[in-house]
Amino acid sequence: MKVQSSRDFKLQREVDYGTPEQNKAVKEIVAAIKQEGDAALFRYTEKFDGVRLSENNIRVTQEELQGAYAEVEDSFVSAIRAAADNIRAFHARQKRNSWMDLQPDGTILGQVIRPLQRVGVYVPGGKASYPSSVLMNVIPAQIAGVPEIVMVTPPATGGKAGIDPYILVAAAEAGVNEIYRVGGAQAVAALAFGTDSIAPVDKICGPGNIYVALAKREVYGAVDIDSIAGPSEIVVLADDSAEPSYIAADLLSQAEHDEMASAILVTPSQTLADAVSAEVEKQLRALPREAIARASVENYGAIIVVENLEEGISVVNRLAPEHLEIVAQDPMGLAGAIQNAGAIFLGPYSSEPVGDYFAGPNHIIPTNGTARFSSPVDVDDFIKKSSLIYYSKEALLRDGGTIMELARREGLEAHARAVEIRLTNEGKGGEGRGE
Amino acid sequence: MKVQSSRDFKLQREVDYGTPEQNKAVKEIVAAIKQEGDAALFRYTEKFDGVRLSENNIRVTQEELQGAYAEVEDSFVSAIRAAADNIRAFHARQKRNSWMDLQPDGTILGQVIRPLQRVGVYVPGGKASYPSSVLMNVIPAQIAGVPEIVMVTPPATGGKAGIDPYILVAAAEAGVNEIYRVGGAQAVAALAFGTDSIAPVDKICGPGNIYVALAKREVYGAVDIDSIAGPSEIVVLADDSAEPSYIAADLLSQAEHDEMASAILVTPSQTLADAVSAEVEKQLRALPREAIARASVENYGAIIVVENLEEGISVVNRLAPEHLEIVAQDPMGLAGAIQNAGAIFLGPYSSEPVGDYFAGPNHIIPTNGTARFSSPVDVDDFIKKSSLIYYSKEALLRDGGTIMELARREGLEAHARAVEIRLTNEGKGGEGRGE
């Protein structure tokens, strides 16, 4: 692994907006689903997935869902349950109440918090299908109180139900209400606009390939979508109290994800830098996904030697990584200086996989420097707020003149008159029916 | 105003994505600013606004800002201050604390809440420039704790400083830190990528014309943006306790905004429906913006007569309006049934302009049915969250096996090994330097 001295290192990579052909194909699929509904949904599923669907078999039945439990190890069920419990406990702390401010003159101002009514979660097929991601997308919605959580996933990915049984078990444990065996852009469009078989949702989340990503962009506005995730990243900030073999293992756990994943060590210790570099090479050779991890390390990995931890923190804040590990003498004491990082792992035992799978915080975290302005998925992503204004007569008589002045200053006379008609009628003792 | 019976009335209008020429022009401008910085910014400002800028006069000085106060009425300053106080008080209640969960085994999990570092607010020139919108965009950012709030606005819109003095006073009162006299797509690009004169921001918000909207879309990803607002809407749900002249005035205060604005009355009372219809016509004739309001009422206005309030509520939830007024015998008792509405105004004295200007809640509210899944602008729009994980050795020894099982199930061996190397080293009493 390259050891570099500090410089204007940039993590940013280009976002994939798809080829013109991919964009055209997605637009066509979305338009067809919008217009033809189920007919188009079944047609594309046969074309892309080789599976003939009808209204009778598009939805996974309770029997199929329960059957999936027989196809997985008991230890997996226990592990998923333990993880789900932790994720639930963490996200439950994010839940917020509606509030009201009752003022002495009778005016009430407030903010009403409500769950979205219906949310769709996309789960990819094949190697990108991760049971842990099902938990991380579904549980925050469930904690938010979303009454209808719908999952879609391609129909020929394994198991007796045609869907990977590990995914089905994770969905059942997380609390998914409906599962449909459709995938791709056609599934996204069906969730957005609805068909006879699938009722439309308010928000679509979950990862997917370029067609899924483009379809989500295409339907955005009709429904909400989550952000489109880029390749994963880790930055480790460490001093010479760190164990090099741990740091190397953590960097590689990121690098094995994807050839475009990025793993970076920032340290003031040349000794640690050299030791980690050697450890990375040693551990790399023993990895099943060596080729992917090696490409990631070579293209997007770096060991950056800085003057001191203070400079290290400023490099971290510039990188704004998805995952940050701080492995130093007093890691908690350094956390306060971190402005930009999606998730912060502190101390020698907080290896990133602890958070990826188990601790409780969400593993869907802003990538590609966007931690500067965005946040891990949480309960807030599945609620909406309404302002509430109950103005009293007393308050309107008091404030009406000021409101009219501001409205007239902006040339909005009808705004002023909506207040004036009340003041005229009620301020002069008129018998407005509004009382 | 048309009186209709209940049916599948749809509020949705098309979103303006601009013409191909507009899209091309914006892409060129954004690329030029990204590459050339100030040189391109000054060139486009001369071309589009007819003003020659340099690094010496692009920024509004403190003297110019203070000078604006002499150009406006004292009563305006008082009115803006009173409104700002209310807006501050309401948004202060939205502020949230970072939290930590300290577990007995030494593990700490938490969520860190931080303000964005630097936010840019776009303020349009001409008739669409509203001092009240400056307050509504800036104050939530300020309450969130954003240390640098930057405003951009076109350079030839009035006053001694070249900028509408009412806008400057509102900016000063709201707490803007820097003001630059640039507008259009070039200003948006300068905020996103930075130039020698303007440091880059993390988020851009505020309304603008189609070029501004397209530029925001274009730079999204490099920075965050707010949502693109559609034409404004009001739905009034009223029973026969309502005063028809008040309802008509409120509908027209919405209709005067824009020919595409939408004003709808939903009522079980045929008497009220007829009376409001007559009142709308009467009040319309006396309005300075009659032509705009009349076009809005004719094209996007409606009076919908429903069977009862229950059906009225279901119509409202389907419309998911930006603004909802409930004028009925027990308005607060009906609020709980409203699932979808950006802002809810209750009772006869909560005329929409009360919220537009003064009460405290934000007036930037989701339009076009998006209240189904989005929310008024608030303090949350100017913060970011980081998860925090400080796992203890005890916890890792306890949970490590489960984490490894989940990682291996997903085929991510390096994830499992990052845990395993610690268990091997520390679980067996090895002398890991990590202790």
Image (cartoon, coloured by chain):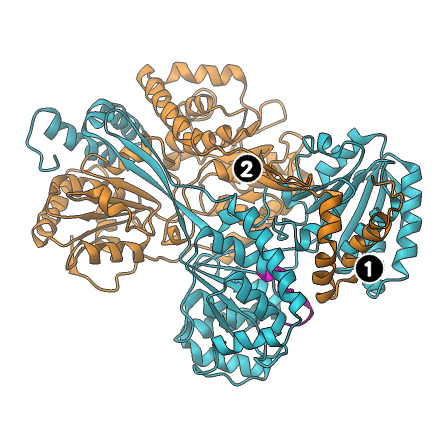
Chain colours: A cyan, B orange
Q: Quadrant of residue B290?
A: top left
Inspect this view and state whether residue A209 appears.
no
**A37 in the magenta segment:** no
Q: Nearer the viewer, residue B323 or B292?
A: B323
**A132 in the magenta segment:** yes
Q: SS for tag 2? A: strand
The amino acid type, in three-letter code, at marker 1 is Ala
Residue A17 in the image, given as x and y percentages of width and height: 62, 60
Q: Which residue is mark 1?
A: A293
Residue A423 in the image, given as x and y percentages of width and height: 15, 28
The span picked out in magenta is A125-134
Q: In 3D space, how far apart are the residues under numbered discs 2 and 1 (Cα atoms)?
A: 34 Å
Residue B238 in the image, given as x and y percentages of width and height: 17, 47
Q: Quadrant of residue A126?
A: bottom right
Q: Is residue A242 above or below residue A104?
A: below
Local crowd size for mark 1, using a 10 Å CA cut-off: few (<14), some (14–19), many (≥20):
many
Local crowd size for mark 2, using a 10 Å CA cut-off: few (<14), some (14–19), many (≥20):
many
Quarter holding the C terminus of chain B is top right
Q: Which residue is mark 2?
A: B383
